[in-house]
Image (cartoon, grey):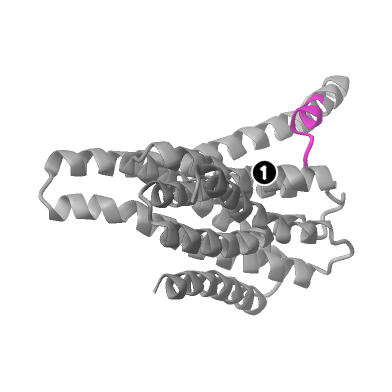
Amino acid sequence: MSTAQTLLLGAIAGLTIFVGLPLGRMQNVSPATKAFLAATATGVLIFLFWDVLSHAVGPVETALKEGRGGRFAWLAFLLTAGFFTGLMSLVYYDTWMKRRRRRAFLGPGAASTAEFEHDHHFTGMSPARWLAIFIATGIGLHNFSEGLAIGQSAAADQISLAIVLIIGFGLHNATEGLGICAPLAGDKERPSWAFLGVLGLIGGAPTFLGTLVGQFWVSEAVSILFFALAAGSILYVVMELLNVGRVLASKTLVTWGVLFGLFLGFSTDFILVAAGA
């Protein structure tokens, strides 16, 4: 398989994320339906959290078992720093944005209005859209690592493995599109196709970029760092989506949605394992 063919297939694996994005334009959605979609997205993301964290921790444990103290310390540092950055950067960013909104509403008179308009111009998006961007960012970090696996397999002439990875990751990305657009379903303002396209590029394009990098450069440390960043950002989004579900619907409905999302995530993973076998 040539480099061009590998890159093309890597791009296709990333572009399947667009399959689920049109759901974000659904209107007149009942609170129960919106809660179920958010819970399903949460289930998919919980699976991805387990998936990326296991990939990040595996090499660190291996270095420890092999008695490679220096290597273990370096990889453990990357794992900790990446996870901390992926999680806490979103927490502090969200806190900063909320402070801006509070100042806009509590400021005196015309200054308050002007500040609010400036803040709205600066953000330009509802909380649901920001949450969709956070989800796409976390998934994008995850997909960059998947792209690295595709590129590295092709570079090592493991063509059958590379093809299996492309098929499996393509299926994964199709379900991830649901996770990205779930907060948008039933939002007051229907997202434009252009906005959905941007979300798809944030979440899916890193698969192509990772494939490109993996073709020419193999680094276990970089893979661990990106997996850890993805795990931290995905954990933040899971907490946000669970809050959404609790407000909109009963615990029973939310739990069924989470279970359904977990089922989707593990199903695509089992297909990948079976094809590899």
- Report the residue at 61% width, 33% height from top: 96
- Report the residue at 40% width, 47% height from top: 152
Up-down: is 78 above or below 37? above
In the picture, the quarter occupied by the C terminus is: bottom left
Up-down: is 238 above or below 121? below
Given the current orientation, which residue lies at the most extreme top position? 111
Query: Which residues are the magenta region?
Result: 118-126
Q: Magenta includes 147?
A: no
Question: Circle 1 is placed at which residue position?
Answer: 201
Where residue 221 appears, as percent x and y from the top left, is: 32, 40
- Report the residue at 67% width, 43% height from top: 201
* Label 1: element kind: helix
Where residue 75 appears, as percent x and y from the top left, is: 27, 42
Could one spot residue 21 in this view of the protein? yes
Where residue 218 appears, as percent x and y from the top left, is: 35, 40
Type of residue at label 1?
Leu
- Report the residue at 88% width, 21% height from top: 110
Given the current orientation, which residue lies at the most extreme left position? 67
- Residue 134 located left or right of residue 123: left
Q: Residues within 10 Å of mark 1 (few under 14, many from 20)?
A: some
